Each structure stands twice: as C-alpha cells, then as structure tokens.
Image (spheres, rainbow, N blue to C red):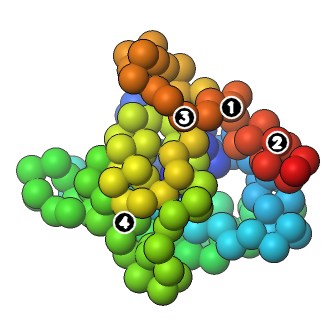
C-alpha cells in the first residue's frame, strides 16, 4: 500500500517531520486487522521531499519509525517499507508511476504480484501497481477524490472510501 493518503493524512506541502505524520482514522486498526488475518503488509511510497531537500533520510526514518510504532500499538505490523527518495529529474525507475518499487517488492517476496492488492490514492499509485503486476485499489482519502475527478472515466478498478473500508470488504469474504 501507499503511505501518504492511505495510512496517514497527506499534504501538498509534503510530510516533512515526525510531528506532521498523522494517521487517517481507522487506518492503523485496518492494518492490525490485516496482520491478524495473516496478510503481509508492505508499503511503497514516493518520498521526493528527500531529493528536494525538504527533509533528510534520517527524518524519513523517524517518520517511518513513528508509523510502525503506531501500527504496532494497535496490534499490526508493517513488514517492510519500500521508498523512492528521488525527484522527477532523477529519472529513476523506482519513482511511481514507474513500477520499480513493485519490482523490488516482487523480488523481496520472490513471487509475482498477480492478484496482490495495491492500495493507493493517486493515479501514479494505480499506474505503478498495474505496471508492476499488482491489482490496483483506489481509496478516496488523500488525493483519491482528485484522482477520481481527473481520471474517473479511465478507472476500471475498485474504489473505497479509505483503507478501513477496503479492509472491511476484503476481510468479509
């Protein structure tokens, strides 16, 4: 799953400090429910604020530690966080919408991502998931509403209010 807009509140000004990381209501409990149900939770996130000089890798590690501690405080577990610290001008293959992070996840899992849900809130999340072989899922939280407004006619994927709503449906089966 993506981080900003799926697990925590997003900001057009970037999440630049540990204090700015605020979970979306229900997301921590949703991850805990996934963990309890035996799902492996992995995060794939663009963090170009590093390349832009807005925050350091040390600060990013602190943000991720806060997120993991908050998830664990609810009984959940994030197995691994994959992130792209590059900016658009770096022309890397790990910056979504390119599928590099998903290729890293497939290598980590030593398995194709076919039928693996990838929850995101932006069109670039969806493009990267699909190109990487995963099953894109859109949430309306974060940039989700903007994504629907701009690409609604193109979207042929499931859409949920937020991560909690998606997990409710997923675990009801």
- Give the mark toward the camera: 4 or 2: 2
Q: Name the one closer to the observer, 12 or 93.
A: 93
Dots 4, 3 in contact, CB < 8 A: no
- Give the mark toward the camera: 4 or 3: 3
How many C-alpha atoms fall within 10 Å of the one at disc 2: few (<14), some, or many (≥20)?
Answer: few
Does residue 84 appear left or right of residue 37 in this picture? Answer: left
- The mark nearer the N terminus, 4 or 2, is 4
How many C-alpha atoms fall within 10 Å of the one at disc 1: few (<14), some, or many (≥20)?
Answer: some
Does residue 132 appear left or right of residue 156 in this picture? Answer: left
- The mark nearer the N terminus, 2 or 3, is 3
Q: Secondary structure at mark 1?
A: strand
Disc 1 from disc 4: Cα separation: 23 Å
How many C-alpha atoms fall within 10 Å of the one at disc 4: few (<14), some, or many (≥20)?
Answer: many
For label 1, the residue is 160
Q: Name the one closer to the observer, 173 or 108.
A: 173
- The mark nearer the N terminus, 2 or 1, is 1
């Amino acid at each position: 799953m993506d981080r900003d807009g799926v697990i925590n509140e997003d900001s057009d000004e970037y999440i630049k400090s540990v204090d700015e990381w605020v979970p979306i209501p229900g997301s921590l409990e949703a991850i805990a429910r996934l963990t309890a149900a035996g799902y492996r939770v992995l995060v794939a996130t663009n963090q170009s604020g590093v390349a832009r000089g807005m925050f350091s890798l040390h600060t990013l590690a602190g943000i991720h530690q806060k997120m993991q501690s908050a998830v664990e405080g609810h009984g959940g577990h994030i197995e691994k966080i994959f992130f792209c610290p590059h900016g658009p001008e770096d022309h890397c293959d790990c910056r979504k919408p390119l599928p590099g992070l998903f290729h890293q996840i497939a290598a980590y899992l030593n398995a194709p991502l076919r039928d693996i849900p990838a929850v995101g809130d932006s069109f670039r999340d969806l493009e990267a998931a699909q190109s990487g072989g995963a099953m894109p899922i859109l949430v309306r939280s974060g940039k989700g509403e903007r994504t629907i407004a701009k690409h609604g006619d193109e979207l042929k994927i499931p859409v949920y209010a937020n991560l909690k709503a998606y997990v409710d449906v997923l675990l009801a089966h």
